[in-house]
Structures are given as structure tokens and as C-alpha cells.
Image (spheres, rainbow, N blue to C red):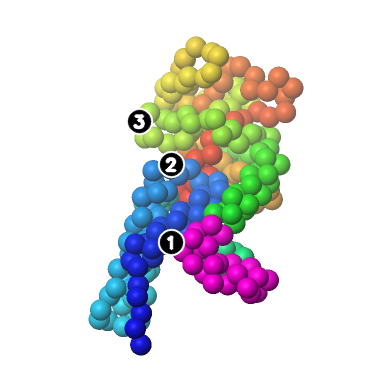
């Protein structure tokens, strides 16, 4: 039996589908991944998948090992997470998105048996994947807009614990300049409730710039203990900083802390 295989088509399909899956995972887990890392991760995964297909010797076991390594590299390049619970959560989310996209394609094949030839072609797979990706992305964004508000549990001096209504601010890219760790902004009145007598060690000077206001400097400290609850799911943040703002963050007092989306990335939350 003779088969004609177009390697460029296989690579393109793997590349685009990997990009869809990584994009959905980044949305689902509220991870911060640049467009460049998403594309490079998708390319690395596609290259590994193509190499596994072309492997002349070694059998199924070797191909599975190569596919696992390509998946690991794809996740690491995209999300900069190479081990721990964060990597497991990324893998789990990728699997969910994979079965979701595959299930939609299978459903279409059953509902439209006459279009099976076109749906399984390169153009059909890519177009169907793009439509599914965009539809799921819009649904996730719609849900996230409803869940922008969150609860933040902070622990301060002498074990005192305060729960604050927070806002996941997608425009907040504030980082501590030495370590590069993400920074949340907390109102001064709440900070003084956490540490009424003495601030914790490790003070940092954090420069900032906001639209419509001059650049300035905030005083920041390592967050002793911070848990963020979004949509009923509570995550413990680590390796993050809190900057103290003398100004009110909300005129109506709806929230007292601004969170950076990177705080919920797998390397910072569990």
C-alpha cells in the first residue's frame, strides 16, 4: 500500500493546533504568556511531533517518549514553568482543551457526514480549529469579565488575617525591579491594619507609571501570605510583592487591592 505524506501540511496543522491549545490554556489558567512564547512553544511542539512521526526505528515506545518530551518543551517555552504543581495544571488544562477541540471535530463529522472529506482535509481541520478556538476564547473571556472581582486573604503581623475585595487588573504589569516578581497594589489603610506596629523586612523601592499620571515610586514588601479566590477556586500566591498606595484605588471603595494577572501563573500560584 502506498501513502503520500506532505510534511509541510502535517507541520502546519500541528503548529496551528498547538497554538490554539496553548492560547486556550493561557486563558483558562489566567497565565501570562507573550505572543512570541505562544508561537515558539507551538513550533517546538510541532517539530517534536513531526520528528516522532518520521522516526524510522524504535517503535511506539520511543515515539511516545519523544511526544512527551515535545509536550514538556512546548509547555516550558510557553509558560516558563518546568516542574511542580504548575506544570501538572498546565498539562491537565492542555488535555482538557485537546479533548474539547477533538470532540467538536468528531461531532461535526457525525452531524455532517457528507462534508467528511473536506473536514478532514488540511484546510478543513485548520478552519474548524480556528472557529472552535475563537468561540471558546470568547466564552472564556465572557466568564472572566464576570469574575474580575475576587477575594484576597492577607496575613500580616502577629498572624492577623484580613480579607479584601480585589480586582484582577489586566493593565497592571508592575514588577519588583530586582527579582522581576509581580507586584500587587494595596491601599495604605489596609496595610496599616495588617502591620500596625512594624513593617516586615525586605522593603523594596518599586517605580511605576500609569496612564494620565506622572511616574512615581511605591514602597513594596514581600507578601508574607496571600491567597486569591476567583470563581470559587482559591490559590495560594508565592514569590510576590505588595506595594503600598497612599491613594484610594477605588472611588466607591469596591476594592482595596489591585492584582497583577501574572500572580496566578503556575510559577507563582498553587
Q: Circle 2 sits on which residue? A: 34
x and y percentages locating residue 113 in the rendered image: 63, 74
Residue 259 lies in quadrant: top right
Residue at 68% x, 44% y: name it.
Answer: 142
For the view shown, which residue lies furthest in the left direction?
Answer: 57
Residue at 71% x, 42% y: name it.
Answer: 146
Residue 62 located left or right of residue 17: left
Give me the C-alpha separation between circle 1 and circle 2.
21 Å
CB atoms at circles 2 and 3 under 8 Å apart? no
Numbered disc total: 3
Q: Nearer the viewer, mark 2 or mark 3?
A: 2
Q: Is residue 144 in the magenta section?
A: no
Give me the C-alpha separation between circle 2 and circle 3.
21 Å
Span highlighted in magenta in the image: 105-129
x and y percentages locating residue 72 in the rendered image: 38, 61
Along the viewing direction, whichever of 176 and 111 lies nearer the viewer? 111
Give me the C-alpha separation between circle 3 and circle 1.
41 Å
Q: Circle 1 sits on which residue? A: 13
Residue at 54% x, 13% y: name it.
Answer: 213
Under tag 3, what secondary structure? loop
Under tag 1, what secondary structure? helix
x and y percentages locating residue 75 in the rendered image: 41, 56
Disc on res. 178: 3
Residue 230 in sight in this render: no
Taking 246 as reference, is 67 above or below it? below
Sequence-first tag of 2 and 3: 2
Q: Is residue 107 in the magenta section?
A: yes
Amino acid at each position: 500500500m502506498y501513502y503520500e505524506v506532505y510534511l509541510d501540511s502535517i507541520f502546519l496543522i500541528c503548529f496551528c493546533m498547538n497554538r490554539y491549545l496553548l492560547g486556550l490554556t493561557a486563558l483558562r489558567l489566567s497565565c501570562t504568556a507573550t505572543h512570541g512564547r505562544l508561537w515558539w512553544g507551538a513550533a517546538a511542539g510541532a517539530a517534536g511531533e513531526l520528528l516522532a512521526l518520521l522516526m524510522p526505528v524504535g517503535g511506539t515506545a520511543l515515539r511516545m517518549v519523544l511526544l512527551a518530551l515535545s509536550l514538556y518543551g512546548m509547555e516550558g517555552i510557553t509558560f516558563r514553568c518546568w516542574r511542580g504543581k504548575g506544570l501538572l495544571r498546565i498539562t491537565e488544562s492542555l488535555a482538557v482543551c485537546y479533548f474539547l477541540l477533538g470532540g467538536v471535530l468528531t461531532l461535526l463529522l457525525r452531524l455532517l457526514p457528507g462534508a467528511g472529506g473536506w473536514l478532514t482535509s488540511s484546510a478543513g481541520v485548520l478552519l474548524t480549529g480556528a472557529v472552535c478556538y475563537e468561540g471558546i476564547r470568547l466564552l472564556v473571556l465572557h466568564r472572566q469579565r464576570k469574575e474580575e472581582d475576587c477575594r484576597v486573604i492577607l496575613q500580616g503581623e502577629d498572624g492577623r488575617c484580613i480579607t479584601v475585595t480585589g480586582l484582577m487588573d489586566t493593565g497592571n504589569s508592575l514588577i519588583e525591579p530586582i527579582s522581576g516578581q509581580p507586584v500587587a497594589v494595596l491601599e495604605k489603610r489596609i496595610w496599616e491594619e495588617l502591620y500596625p506596629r512594624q513593617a516586615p523586612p525586605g522593603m523594596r523601592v518599586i517605580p511605576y507609571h500609569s496612564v494620565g499620571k506622572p511616574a512615581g515610586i511605591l514602597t513594596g514588601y514581600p507578601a508574607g501570605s496571600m491567597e486569591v479566590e476567583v470563581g470559587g477556586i482559591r490559590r495560594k500566591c508565592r514569590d510576590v510583592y505588595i506595594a503600598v498606595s497612599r491613594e484610594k484605588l477605588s472611588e466607591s471603595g469596591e476594592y482595596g487591592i489591585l492584582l497583577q494577572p501574572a500572580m496566578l501563573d503556575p510559577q507563582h500560584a498553587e
